[in-house]
Image (cartoon, rainbow, N blue to C red):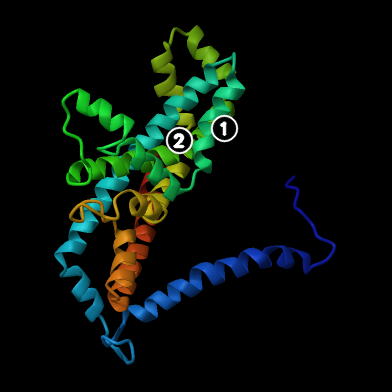
Amino acid sequence: MIKRATFGNRGLPYALLLPQVVITLVFFFWPAGQALVQSVLIEDAFGLKTSFAGLANFERVFADESYLKSLRTTAIFTAASCLLSMSVALLLAVMADRIIRGAGAYKTLLIWPYAVAPALAGVLWGFMFNPTIGVVAYVLQAFGINWNYHVDGDQALFLVTLAAAWKQVSYNFIFFLAGLAAIPRSVIEAAAIDGAGPAKRFWTIVFPLLSPTTFFLLVLNIVHLFFDSFGIVHALTSGGPGGATEILVFKVWSDGSRGTDLGGSAAQSVVLMAIVIALTVAQFRYIERRVHY
């Protein structure tokens, strides 16, 4: 028999949902609608006259070599950051699930970085890897590595990827740890009795049972890296050097705020939104089939 929640007042469920609906409408649908409208308009140089441009803004965006470069940079940055953050978080969660003495302190220290704002995370990593005063940069130069992410695009992209992955490790760690705690110990103990080693138990039992958590984190991490990494990039490299770290969300802001190309910036934001929606749908359509619930 399925138990269903009942409300004495029929208006109560709608009243409880109303704040979330209002927030979604005001902070998502309304800005998205404004971006759609702005993407088909063009303003004169002084912002005094607006005219309908159709798909001209989109054609100009896709013909821009710097935008195509930003698209490739975003793909590399997102894939590397997502893989690194989830892999490290899973490793730390497995270690935390086994540790006994000091487990509370160990887990607390791993969760703390999630409270750091993205912009502040960019500043912290910028200080550590600063080629003049940075501690890590000093160690790298002592090993003969000519480190200067201000002029080397590959180093800048590597640093931004590292900072974004570090920022997400704590979030992923929390969910992986919860997923590990939900796995029955009897299943793992039965596999150990049958002679399965730690590695085999992990890949044949633990990891498949973590697939719902992994899929959930994969979707959220990709969305986060596409949108919420702006603060890290802005604080750490400002898209440089030479556009090497200019990911899509930063280019939307840069072209709109710095270049005052509101129509082109709105078109880029629509394309970015379409990319994220397409990736999310593809993940639910194809990757979720491999998930064991």
Q: Classify 10 Å Cα crowding around label 2: few (below 14), some (14-19), many (20 and above).
A: some
Whether residue 12 is situated above or below residue 106 in the rendered picture: below
Q: Earlier in the sequence, mark 1 or mark 2?
A: 1
The quarter of the picture where residue 21 lies is: bottom right
Residue 127 falls left or right of residue 212: left
**Figure label count:** 2
Q: Position of residue 97 (x, y in %)?
A: 54, 21
Depth check: 12 or 140 in front? 140
* Residue under the point 20% across and 75% down: 59
Marker disc for residue 193: none
Whether residue 181 is situated above or below residue 59 in the rendered picture: above
Q: What residue is shown with label 2? A: 211
* Residue under the point 47% across and 8% down: 194
Amino acid at the residue labelled 1: Ala
Q: Position of residue 258 (x, y in %)?
A: 30, 69
Q: Classify 10 Å Cα crowding around label 1: few (below 14), some (14-19), many (20 and above).
A: some
Q: CA distance from mark 1 to mark 2?
A: 13 Å
